[in-house]
Image (cartoon, rainbow, N blue to C red):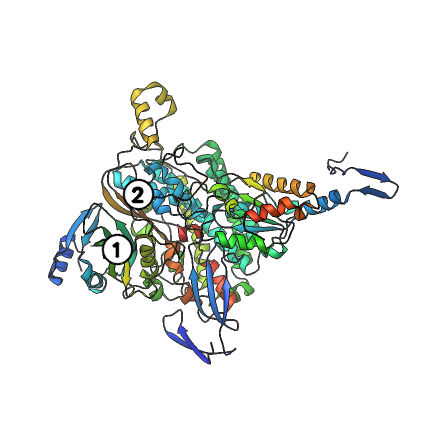
């Protein structure tokens, strides 16, 4: 195909005309297995020399049919599936699901559970943003930041192991609270983390934030304007980088987020540098929230008194008839979830993670749909990179933080 | 201006549209159901009218209810008004033999992939969509998997015996 | 006394200034300690692999400092994560492009047998499309388990006969998967 001048819609929504360098377009297949696309998705790029004319993404290489699978599983067995959505910050998905079921069933949880949930979710947000920013560094060639920051992921993994027993896909919490209270080891580890992490994070920031080369690489790479981002239903740090301060934790507070004092960082131009900086600042804000939650952790129970949804203690099961029956029914999946439909959303690490649950009163959902932020904002990718160089396209993709599990579900 | 209540919204809708719009309210969210021929007009009114202001498209998904004869396939839109923090759920249903609905990409660019996913799972074709193809499943798949009559498991798998797996 | 453990010598004849052993054992030793992996990371197990590569569970001490993302230069294909039916042919293509000798490590329950995703879109185990040498179960497996799997691959590489890849049995194995 021979082109002398070509036109496409730029990231600001307007049509741009470019002079052709090569005179014709070449097709380049990026992916699905490519080291720089962190996850498996394919982009067929039409390129004029080094510039991208257009891109056609193909996804679905890890489609695991979560929504059909959820129609088969009882409500408390869906938590492991939600883990595998955004697997870099699985507690947020777990707790979001439990909040949805609690909303449908009308369960009120004690304040302590709320604060515990906030601590766990903010830790998940910190490690997700860490891995995203470290990987932006790797894609620009700065591997040191990645090695430094993966160590801190290990520290948070140890804390998750204390509560749930698992490192990555945590299956944390239950409908009505947590399976066990924070142990002494958890308190020790959290205090050590809160003390040591800010210094290490400062080292990482010093490596990249005001680094001349990094700034030259990432400023004006893959920008998107706020109007286009809103039209594409962006949420989360990618939207906040364009200047719109939408955060589900502030708009519709859940889990007592209204008790905490924190700032929503916003960027200006929606380019890669803004996305990087928004995530950096969100890590600091999450630390602030964890401090407030931990210092004011209220006394009380770590779960609600809902024996029909929450597994009773094993000693009770061996001694009392009601506990035995409740245990049997919950394990068999016969929890009394009322008929109805509910939409609940939480602020995931990538944006508004929504759960649309339709129940017909049976033991499994009738329909469960996940509103996955990655899936929704990735459709803007061709527009964000048209007219950009190939290396900018790679950086844009890693700064969008596309997690394949959430993309395909 | 004062925040609108659900009754105000319903009155505005009834004034604007002559056809029947049924409504319900569950868990703090107003749910309306509109006929599929006029769904884009209803969505446009909700998005662009001054008082309605539901400018953000949260999600589009599909649903299959075999028990509701002649209204088996549904498309469900979630909209959000950020100024007044109101959400609304808009449903439209169609017969399973005639799964066509107009596309919402004329209003929001983000509806593009959401509608492709709904097509992939339920077979609902969105007329006017720029690229109505499957998005998550393999292209040569010849059925729409989330319809209730299809099994979750792949029937051709050989290594798992259904008798032992409780299917 | 230093506490550095010296590795075992293969059986051979020793004299002043020379050590004679079979070519198999020498080549096996060299191969085992210098494998270049191809991390085929698709989902959650890929993040556990990133943790294994990190400084806590260091993979580099096994000789795997350099991840080869090009199949032509890789020795081990480490499949980590769920393989969907859409991805199956691509996995087979990547396997075919690798040069002999090559080993396959299947990390995670999804790669071994489909895992919790017994659905219409997930391949129930990568051994439906490529021959696998070592299976590491877990969801996701801990980094220690992944390292154990890698050490088993190292054992296989160390003890493999030099004629194995040209033998009839091996060719029949590849025929079974339609790989010629």
The quarter holding residue A60 reads: bottom left
- Depth check: give the residue in front, B3 or B8: B8
Q: Residue at x 21, y 47 (%)?
A: B28
Q: Is residue C58 left or right of residue C31?
A: left
Residue lying at the far top of the rendered structure: A319
- Depth check: give the residue in front, C130 or C27: C130
- Residue B41 visible here: yes
Q: Is residue B22 left or right of residue A85?
A: left
Disc 2 element: helix
- Residue B77's disc number: 1
- Residue A292 visible here: no
Q: Residue at x 54, y 55 (%)?
A: C93
Say above or below: B166 vs C157.
above
Q: Residue at x 82, y 42 (%)?
A: C20
- Say if mark 2 contacts mark 1, CB within 8 Å: no
Disc 1 element: strand
């Amino acid at each position: 195909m021979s082109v002398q001048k070509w036109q496409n819609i730029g990231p600001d929504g307007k049509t741009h005309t470019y002079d052709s360098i090569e005179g014709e377009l070449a097709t380049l297949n990026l992916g699905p297995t490519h080291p720089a696309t962190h996850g498996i998705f394919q982009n067929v790029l039409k390129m004029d020399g080094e510039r991208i004319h257009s891109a056609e993404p193909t996804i679905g290489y890890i489609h695991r049919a979560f929504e059909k699978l959820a129609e088969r599983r009882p409500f408390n067995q869906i938590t492991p599936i939600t883990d595998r959505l955004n697997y870099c910050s699985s507690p947020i998905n777990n707790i979001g699901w439990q909040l949805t079921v609690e909303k449908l069933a009308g369960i009120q949880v004690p304040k302590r559970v709320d604060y515990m949930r906030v601590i766990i979710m903010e830790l998940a947000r910190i490690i997700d943003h860490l891995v995203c920013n470290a990987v932006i560094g790797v894609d620009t060639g700065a591997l040191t930041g990645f090695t430094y920051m993966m160590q801190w992921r290990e520290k948070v993994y140890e804390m998750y192991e204390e509560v749930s027993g698992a490192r990555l896909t945590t299956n944390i919490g239950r409908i009505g609270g947590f399976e066990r209270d924070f142990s002494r080891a958890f308190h020790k580890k959290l205090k050590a983390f809160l003390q040591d992490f800010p210094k290490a994070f400062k080292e990482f920031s010093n490596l990249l934030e005001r680094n001349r080369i990094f700034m030259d690489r990432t400023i004006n790479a893959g920008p998107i304007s706020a109007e286009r981002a809103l039209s594409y239903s962006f949420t989360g740090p990618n939207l906040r980088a364009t200047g719109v301060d939408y955060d589900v934790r502030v708009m519709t507070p859940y889990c007592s987020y209204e008790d905490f004092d924190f700032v929503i960082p916003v960027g200006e131009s929606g380019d890669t540098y803004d996305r990087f900086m928004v995530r950096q600042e969100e890590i600091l804000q999450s630390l602030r929230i964890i401090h407030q939650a931990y210092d004011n952790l209220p006394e009380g129970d770590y779960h609600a008194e809902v024996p029909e949804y929450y597994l009773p203690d094993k000693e009770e099961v061996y001694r009392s008839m009601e506990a035995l029956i409740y245990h049997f029914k919950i394990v068999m999946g016969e929890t009394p979830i009322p008929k109805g439909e509910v939409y609940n959303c939480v602020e995931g690490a990538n944006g508004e993670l929504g759960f649309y649950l339709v129940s017909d009163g049976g033991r499994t959902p009738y329909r469960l749909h996940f509103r996955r932020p990655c899936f929704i904002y990735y459709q803007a990718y061709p527009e964000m990179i048209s007219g950009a160089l190939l290396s900018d396209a790679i950086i844009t993709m890693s700064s969008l933080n596309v997690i394949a599990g959430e993309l395909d579900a | 201006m004062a925040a609108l209540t659900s009754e105000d919204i319903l009155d505005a809708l009834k004034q604007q549209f002559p056809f029947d719009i049924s409504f319900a309210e569950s868990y703090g969210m107003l749910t309306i159901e509109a006929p599929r021929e006029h769904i884009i007009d209803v969505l446009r009114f909700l998005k662009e009218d001054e008082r309605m202001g539901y400018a953000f498209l949260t999600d589009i998904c599909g649903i299959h209810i075999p028990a509701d004869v002649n209204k088996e396939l549904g498309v469900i839109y979630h909209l959000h008004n950020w100024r007044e923090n109101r959400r609304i759920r808009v449903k439209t249903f169609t017969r399973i033999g005639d799964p066509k609905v107009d596309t919402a990409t004329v209003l929001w660019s983000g509806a593009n992939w959401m509608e492709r996913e709904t097509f992939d799972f339920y077979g609902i074709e969105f007329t006017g969509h720029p690229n109505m193809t499957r998005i998550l499943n393999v292209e040569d798949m010849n059925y729409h998997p989330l319809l209730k009559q299809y099994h979750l498991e792949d029937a051709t798998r050989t290594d798992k015996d259904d008798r032992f797996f409780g299917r | 006394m230093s506490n550095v453990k010296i590795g075992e010598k293969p059986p051979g004849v020793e004299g002043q200034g020379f050590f004679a052993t079979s070519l198999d054992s020498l080549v096996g030793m060299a191969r085992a300690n210098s494998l270049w992996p191809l991390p085929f990371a698709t989902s959650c197990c890929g993040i556990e692999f990133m943790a294994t590569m990190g400084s806590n569970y260091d993979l580099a001490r096994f000789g795997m400092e350099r991840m080869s993302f090009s199949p032509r230069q890789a020795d081990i294909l480490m499949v980590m994560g769920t393989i969907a039916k859409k991805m199956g042919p691509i996995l087979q293509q990547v396997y075919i492009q690798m040069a002999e000798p090559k080993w396959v490590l299947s990390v995670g329950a999804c790669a071994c047998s489909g895992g919790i995703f017994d659905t219409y879109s997930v391949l129930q185990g990568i051994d439906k499309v490529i021959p696998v040498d070592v299976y590491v179960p877990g969801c996701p497996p801990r980094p220690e388990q992944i390292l154990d799997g890698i050490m088993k691959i190292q054992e296989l590489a160390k003890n493999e006969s030099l004629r194995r890849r040209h033998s009839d049995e091996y060719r029949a194995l590849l025929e079974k998967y339609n790989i010629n």
